[in-house]
Amino acid sequence: MSTVYGLAMVASLLMIGVYYYVDRKHDKWLMFLFVCVAVCDLGYFLLSLSKTLNAALWANRIAYLGSVFLPFSLFMMVMSLSRFSYPKYLPQILIGINTVMLLIAASGGILPIYYKNVSLDFVNGLPVLIKEYGPLHAVYKVFLFAYFAAMVAVIAYTVVKKTVVSSKHTVFLAFVVIGNISIWLVENMIHSSFEFLSISYIVTEGMILFLYSILQDYGITDTPQEAVAETQQHGEAPEEIKAFSNEQIDEIMKSWNTVNTLSQREKEVLRFLLENKKRKVIADTLFVTESTIKKHTSGIYRKLEISSRAELFEKSKKYLNQ
């Protein structure tokens, strides 16, 4: 069984590397979530190797370090993906609550508040902590249910307010959250000696990465401030900007030497931008997705050393009649 826990730990560490590849913005809450899973699986693995009660208790504390902060990171990630606005001080308050919960959960073998009594037994060669729960053990269940309820509430709220990219993504995110709740409930009901969460966490990571890889193309993983800036730069064409004529566009592209550094497709997109076409119109004309046009636009802006459509038009005027 220790081999399974060891493989789960290795997989959780590999998932951190996958995260760096998938999440181009390196979202801090997603990173925190992956670290928590790795710490949790490390604790399970060390517990499976424990030979003494003291070693098992310390391994159990490491597992709790990851599992106590995991719902916090998942909750923050859900709010980020749902574009749910929250006070700046909320993360600090939640970290304080989580720290108190961790101290309570880690008190086993020291104070009789989480475990009244705890001993080490071996079942089929696998070390198992035999616990007699103390008065504050129920607090952990309330703690988890509060987080899961908050996640469901945020998802439900954003469905009503329509701040998510689509109902499909909302259902997917809700499935991730409710799936973890279900696994945790089943594990508590059957009282298995094997921690199924060590596997389910990794599956959850894969599902979240899949969701992130999709949502990044829609800009949904941006903060609200970043989303506004992105819309101004790459979204709807500003009505107040007057489009250039075809003759003017030809002159601009001929006189602006840096345009030659663009790819052929980028030059096509640039012409549409100078016509002040909306991104959806450009995408439909070129038979590609809006996210593809967004990527081309980002490349154009980077090469032309500009940051918005308004700046593109302002700078283009300098190349007319040169």
Image (tube, rainbow, N blue to C red):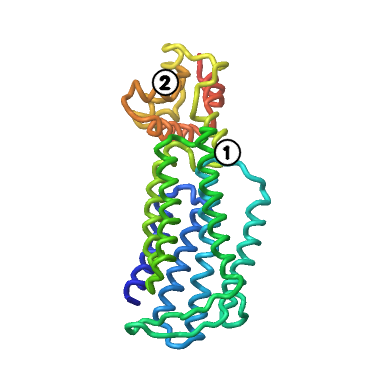
Q: What residue type is labelled 2?
A: Phe
Residue lying furthest bottom in this view?
52
Q: Which amino acid does label 1 sit on?
A: Pro
Mark 1 Cα-neighbour bin, 10 Å: few <14, some 14–19, many ≥20: some
Residue 13 is at least partly visible in this image: no
Residue 247 is at least partly visible in this image: yes
Along the viewing direction, whichever of 139 and 20 lies nearer the viewer: 139
Side of 179 where 132 appears, left or right: right
Relative to 188, say whether 145 is above or below.
above
Mark in the foreground, 1 or 2 = 1
| Residue 288: quadrant of the picture | top left
Along the viewing direction, whichever of 262 and 129 lies nearer the viewer: 129
Side of 128 where 88 appears, left or right: right
Residue at 51% across, 73% down: 62
Residue at 35% across, 32% down: 263
Q: Which mark is residue 272?
A: 2
Residue under label 1:
224
Please state the horizontal and vertical placement of residue 125, each as a whole percent of the image.
34, 84
Residue at 61% across, 80% down: 112
